[in-house]
Image (cartoon, helix red, strand yellow):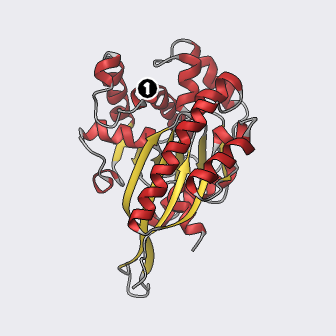
Amino acid sequence: MDNKLLATVDIGSHSCILLIAAFEEAPATGDSEAPKQILVPKLQKVEICRLGEDIYDSGRISEERIADLCRIMTKFRMDLHALGVELKAAAMTEAMRRAENQEEVLDAVEKALWMRPRIITGEEEAALTYRSVKEWHGEGIVTIDIGGGSTEISNGATGFSIPVGALKMFKAMGPIPGPEYKKFVKETFKEVSFKGMTKKPVYLIGGTGTALAMVFKNLSQFDYKAIEGLEMSLSDLEAVTTRISNLSKELRAMLPGLENGRSDVIICGLFWLRSLLEKLRVETFRISTAGLRFGLLYENQ
């Protein structure tokens, strides 16, 4: 019997994620609807790579960072080999979109992973992210993917990327944004239109959303079933932001979901989320654990 498990690798500006999943038949939701195939995650591994730090400092990925990335990719490849899982796609996002030495990085990753990743545009990333959430939660929604170096927003019909992410903000403002944040947001939104996206159900994905949900629910370990579809309000967001901001750097790093460097950038991500939600004119939002890595598998259906 063939192994039905499939895999993708998402290489972002802050972290790399290995997804192993399978298409399974979901029950019909109405008398006239036939069952459909949905993606069910079986294993997800996250490794921090912080490629974006190099981009903001020098415009290229350093040899040290490339070596770290290749070690991560080798581990992912060995996991896939041990489980007999086929790697269907690998994608790189904002950090690689801006890197001056793209070919050098791609060559090194291909050697470690045995697959050459593709560098996708911000618009492609927004569309694939939306697709991944739509398959679980339906249409008529807006997705926000706050990454390390960029943010993708989509309503299905249109999608775009803003070159702002939690890691990028951290590099510019430190762990807690100060008075300069107000000017930063004003300048950023000058070129952004949210037409057709306001007052719709919002789903937040990405590391910022997952970490927010884990702190909010005091989860000691990632559990996608406990997080998926979790509804939060602006006041909930404010409470979590205040709680995290009042902790020392050492205590912040001990909170669930904030290990492996996430504690450095999380507050910047939450500030940015609040600004986006205000622009989208919503009082509540939901968390989704879907994302680009799922969209890549739907794309290859």
Q: Is residue 221 visible?
A: yes
Q: Quadrant of the C terminus?
A: bottom right
Q: Can you tell which quarter of the image residue 24 is in?
A: bottom left
Q: Nearer the viewer, residue 19 or 189?
A: 19
Residue 240 in picture, x, y percent from top left: 33, 29
Report the residue at 35% width, 48% height from top: 231
Residue 90 in picture, x, y percent from top left: 59, 56
Q: Nearer the viewer, residue 118 or 38?
A: 118
Q: Is residue 206 above or below residue 23?
A: above
Residue 285 in picture, x, y percent from top left: 42, 45
Left or right of 33 in this view: 140: right
Left or right of 181 in this view: 193: right
Q: Is residue 283 visible?
A: no
Residue that carries the numbered disc 1 in the rendered image: 267
Q: Secondary structure at mark 1?
A: helix
User: How many marks can you see?
Assistant: 1
Report the residue at 50% width, 43% height from top: 71
Left or right of 271 in this view: 83: left
Residue 263 in picture, x, y percent from top left: 39, 27
Q: Quadrant of the N terminus?
A: bottom left
Q: Can you tell which quarter of the image residue 96 is in?
A: top right
Q: Is residue 137 above or below residue 182?
A: below
Report the residue at 41% width, 83% height from top: 35
Report the residue at 61% width, 59% height from top: 115
Q: Nearer the viewer, residue 203 or 21?
A: 21
* Circle 1 crowding by C-alpha within 10 Å: few under 14, some 14–19, many from 20: many
* Disc 1 residue type (three-letter): Ile
Q: Can you tell which quarter of the image residue 266 is in?
A: top left
